[in-house]
Amino acid sequence: MSAPVAPFRWLWGQAYLLLPFTFLFWAGNAIVGRAVADSFPPAALAQLRWIGAGLIVLPFAWRYLRADAALIRKHWVVLLVMSFTGITVFNTLQYAALEHTTALNVLLLQATMPLLIAAGSFVINRDRLTGGQIAGIAVSIAGVLAIVSGGDLNVLLHFRLNPGDAIFVFALAVYSIYSALLKRRPGLHWLSFLAVTIWWGAILLLPVTIWEFAQGARPEMTAGNGLALVYVMIFPSVIAYLCFNRGVELIGPNRVGPFFHLVPLFGTLLAVALLGEAFTLAHAAGAALIACGIGLASLKSRKPLPAPQPD
């Protein structure tokens, strides 16, 4: 995956700086998705999101798509599976889950993602977790629990699953397949890969969107909903996926797994900043544990990576 333009070339090689942007924007996506859940049917929201993101990417990716046409035809199966799991299924089910479950449940369930990625990586790539990665996942899960419980054990003891939770867990399991397959991503230009997965994912979603429309579901377009749509098109779609794909390329899916625990942390910080919620000692302790967990998961020495080359 070659580097973007010169000013970002150094950043393009820094997985531990790129990945936090991914999960900051995905935390924002969860908040925005919950806020517009009553205004947008889930498939319609996902469809508009990915068509918009695809239109943003396409002018920049067009010349690389033409150059990579032979590779795309050769590896169409794995690209199709990645489009289906990472774009079509995961995001639609996430929006569907947000119609039926609570923010607390989503934050707790997010903690399962590193384990699901580890399972997917083992099945698909035969990758095993190291001791540091296991310790990192455990410590960062403790941080997630501290944040979502507010330090109150009763919150965790009274945690209850509902149908939305089942939808969300399935969505996370599907996304773990996409994460594991990133290790086998064909050698397309990074813009080619993003454009292909976005557009194929949007096309694969069309039957569900048409069915949803036939059932009478309609999005409500207001100024606020329009701003929400612009946000999900740009930040959790284009920018977050670029950072995530590059992060997995640099350090592998298992080391990326604990970063998913940044979602509840960033979600909490966004709630404090935007909704005026209080920042407590439990939040600070949870943030420290998540940071320690990510550090532990990264302890294994890595082979030096070649410096990114310009296009």
Image: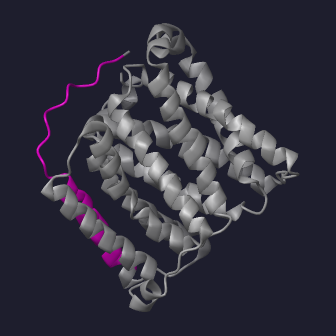
Q: Position of residue 86 (x, y in %)?
A: 51, 40
Query: Residue 249: in sight, yes or no?
Result: yes
Q: Whole-percent x and y of residue 94?
A: 59, 55
Seen in the picture, residue 118 relative to 68 is either above or below; the reply is below
How many numbered callouts? Answer: 0
Q: Is residue 126 left or right of residue 82?
A: left
Given residues 19 and 123, the one toward you in this image is 123
Q: If the image is split into quadrants, where does the N terminus sit?
A: top left
Q: Please identify the residue farthest to the front as the structure is shown.
A: 123
Seen from the viewer's position, the closer of residues 6 and 60 is: 60
Q: Is residue 190 magenta?
A: no
Residue 79, above or below 86: above
When the figure is inspected, residue 123 is found, relative to residue 266, above or below; the finding is above
The reply, left or right, for residue 210 in relation to residue 265 is right
**Which residue does the image show at 27% across and 45% down from the upper left?**
122
Above or below, comparing residue 93 to residue 247 in the picture: below
Please give left or right for residue 262 compared with residue 87 in the image. Answer: left
In this picture, which residue range is highlighted in magenta?
A: 283-310
Q: Quadrant of residue 10?
A: top left
Residue 235 seen by the camera:
no
Q: Residue at x 37, y 82 (%)?
A: 282
Question: Which quadrant: the C terminus?
Answer: top left
Residue 201 horizontal/vertical position (percent):
60, 34
Q: Position of residue 72 (x, y in %)?
A: 48, 16
Q: Colour scheme in the image?
A: one colour
Residue at point 26% right, 49% down? 255
Residue at (61%, 68%) from the top-left corner? 163
Magenta-span inclusion, residue 291? yes
